[in-house]
Amino acid sequence: MPAEWERHEATWLGWPHELTDWPDKFAPIPWAFAEIVRHLSRVERVYLLVENRKCESRVRTILKKAGANLSAVDFFCVPTDRGWMRDSGPICVRNGGTEVAYNHFVFNGWAKYPNHKKDAVAVTKVNQKLRLRLWQPEHKGRRVVLEGGSIDVNGRGTLLTTEECLLSKVQERNPGFTKEDYAQVFREYFGVTNVLWLKKGIAGDDTHGHVDDLARFVNPSTVVTVMENDPKDANYAPLQENLALLQTMKDQDGRPLRVKTLPMPAPVYFDGLRLPASYANFYIANKIVIMPTFNDSNDRAAL
């Protein structure tokens, strides 16, 4: 499985439409996604999932107004429930040459949301057009549930994940799976030889412990991880524990990892619920990095 920063043909995006993902805040969201497409379309292709042709026409208008390079955007009329493609989309792998294939894991709405059935089959529908080799990973006689945001790789054989996401009884993905079960799955379908287990994810993450807003590889030997400086904050102790673990961990060749820290923004709440605001939830495209900011004093330091 290649690392996120390795050169790639395109980025998958699902156009936003699920209002409950942004309750009472949806109006600016399409424009925020259009800004993402604008930046991506300058450096690579964008594969964009939309509900239907009517939606495609509307999205084209928004993207044109936003200044996106429409010649670099390919539209796929594939209905989705939410369209968070890092989690529900295909996970790409390649062989020693240039052949690319897809791993299509089961997506079950993070073992939380019932409206996930369209997302669960979107990969198959997309691949009817792309016609790449497609695997549906199995272990112990059953399909494996996995989201892309629950793992991060360095492209050399090492993978980061969390116990809270993959081993917890809360929002349980694969009942009965152990670390060794996951190691076998990662070895067979990703070519991973070294699995690094962190403990808990950040507070407010309704995926229950995804690593993609916690700790990320930025090159084969370097991990950036978020840190909370307020001892009274719910994130303080778990993030300290994860930092201590990372500082003892080694890569696939037995070399210690280089560990860098990112600050956390001030807690963000909506209707009394904490949101999983994190600078680690970035995306590395071919020539740019897209990163969330929060109108926070730590924005500049994180950038």
Image (cartoon, grey):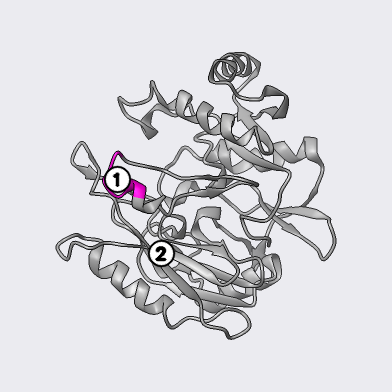
Side of 193 relative to 257 (left or right) = right
- Residue 142 pos. (x, y %): 62, 62
Residue 292 lies, with reference to residue 80, above or below; the image says below
- Asked which quadrant contains residue 141, the reply is bottom right
Asked whether residue 80 appears in the rendered view, the answer is: no
Please name the residue shown 38% across and 53% down the image.
302
Front-lying residue, 143 or 153: 153
Tell which residue pokes out farthest to the bottom in this image: 254
Q: Distance between the residues labelled 2 and 1?
A: 18 Å
- Give how far across and how far down residue 167 sits, in percent: 43, 69
Q: Between residues 186 and 75, which one lies in front from this camera angle?
A: 75
**Quarter of the figure that contains the N terminus:** bottom right
Question: Quadrant location of residue 41?
Answer: top right
Q: Residue at x 64, y 38 (%)?
A: 122
- Label 2 neighbour load within 10 Å: few <14, some 14-19, many 20+: many
- Relative height, residue 15 to residue 294 (above, below): above
* Magenta-colored segment: predominant secondary structure: loop
Q: Name the residue under label 1.
A: 275
- For residue 165, what is the image quadrant? bottom left
Residue 115 seen by the camera: yes
Label 2 SS: strand
Amino acid carrying label 1: it is Leu
Residue 258 versus residue 122 in the image, above or below: below
Q: Pick whichever of labels 2 and 1 is earlier in the sequence.
A: 2
Seen in the image, is 265 located left or right of residue 172? left
Tell me the SS state at disc 1. Answer: loop
Tag 2 residue = 225
Residue 261 percent location from the top left of the image: 38, 65
Q: Find the magenta span and give its range.
A: 295-300
Residue at left 37%, top 71%? 199
